[in-house]
């Protein structure tokens, strides 16, 4: 049987204020388990997306990054040194949302798969590909930041709405939210990985203590 920390030990080790953000002490442990399960998936996606952005922009200007980031480093070092927030700003500035993900993936993507409360469209317009791509990138960054700071991914706010939600707007300045239910986080990340290559879904899942396949 798996040993459990008693409540007093959890409070001493993690603090009462942190544990107060969870519905029960077990959820805190479940959250850490979830984070451990998804960090490599997030890392893979971050690497792929930044490389895809660099590839797209390098087709027009091979020195585009060096002109923005004025540092004496190799190109590979420059690419890896920029955080995900930087790359999302680049996507917004150059308006290349549609080029990050495959057209078929964006066309068939239904956000209700990840949270039933996600609306299908804006009040007056449909959800375009670039809206979907922007929502994906914002959600990925949100999950990444919350996970890498060991925050509660299971948290539900008012009206049963997941804390993991982002706002996107259309040209009429109408806003809608896109959310990921905690139980759908792994599925969301797997769908993103699979959109780049089907074998990425289980990439990096070699068990500790075993050798990687040759």
Image: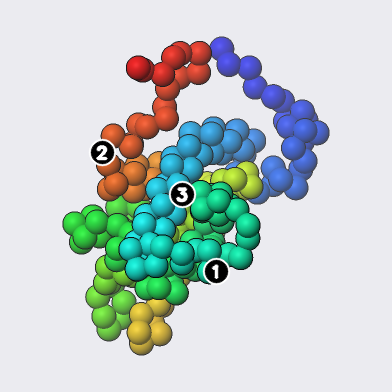
Which element type, helix, strand or loop, lies under badge 1? helix
Vertical placement of 163 versus 39: above or below? Answer: below
Circle 3 Cα neighbour tier, 10 Å, few/some/many (<14 / 14–19 / ≥20): many
Q: Coloring scheme of the render?
A: rainbow
From the viewer's perspective, tell me whether residue 144 is left or right of residue 24: left
Is 19 placed above or below 121 here? Answer: above
Residue appearing at x 34%, y 44% in the figure: 193
Which residue is pictured at 31% across the width and 69% down the height?
130
Residue that mark 1 sits on? 68
* Real-space CA distance between mark 3 and mark 2, rounded to the nearest whole angstrom: 17 Å
Question: At 35% from the left edge and 84% from the top edge, which residue is drawn?
Answer: 171
Q: Which residue is mark 3?
A: 46
Q: Give the x, y percent position of residue 13.
A: 77, 33
Q: Is residue 72 above or below residue 12?
A: below
- What's the residue at 38%, 82% (across, down)? 174
Answer few, some or many: residues within 10 Å of disc 2's Cα (few below 14, many 20 plus, some between 14 and 19): few
Task: Name the residue that disc number 2 marks.
Answer: 198
Q: Residues within 10 Å of mark 1 (few under 14, many from 20)?
A: few
Looking at the rendered structure, the secondary structure element under dot 3 is helix
Q: Earlier in the sequence, mark 3 or mark 2?
A: 3
């Amino acid at each position: 049987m798996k040993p459990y920390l008693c409540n007093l030990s959890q409070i001493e080790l993690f603090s009462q204020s942190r544990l107060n953000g969870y519905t029960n002490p077990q959820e805190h442990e479940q959250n850490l388990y979830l984070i451990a399960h998804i960090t490599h998936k997030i890392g893979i996606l971050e690497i792929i997306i930044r490389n895809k952005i660099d590839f797209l922009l390098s087709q027009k200007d091979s020195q585009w990054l060096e002109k923005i980031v004025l540092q004496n480093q190799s190109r590979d070092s420059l690419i890896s040194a920029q955080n995900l927030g930087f790359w999302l700003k680049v996507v917004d500035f150059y308006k290349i949302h549609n080029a990050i993900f495959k057209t078929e993936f964006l066309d068939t993507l239904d956000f209700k798969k990840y949270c039933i409360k996600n609306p299908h469209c804006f009040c007056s317009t449909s959800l375009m590909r670039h809206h979907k791509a922007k929502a994906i990138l914002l959600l990925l960054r949100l999950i990444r930041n919350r996970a890498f700071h060991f925050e509660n991914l299971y948290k539900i706010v008012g009206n049963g709405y997941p804390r993991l939600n982002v706002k996107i707007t259309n040209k009429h300045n109408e806003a809608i939210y896109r959310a990921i239910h905690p139980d759908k986080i792994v599925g969301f990340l797997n769908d993103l990985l699979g959109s780049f290559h089907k074998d990425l879904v289980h990439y990096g899942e070699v068990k500790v203590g075993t050798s990687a396949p040759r």
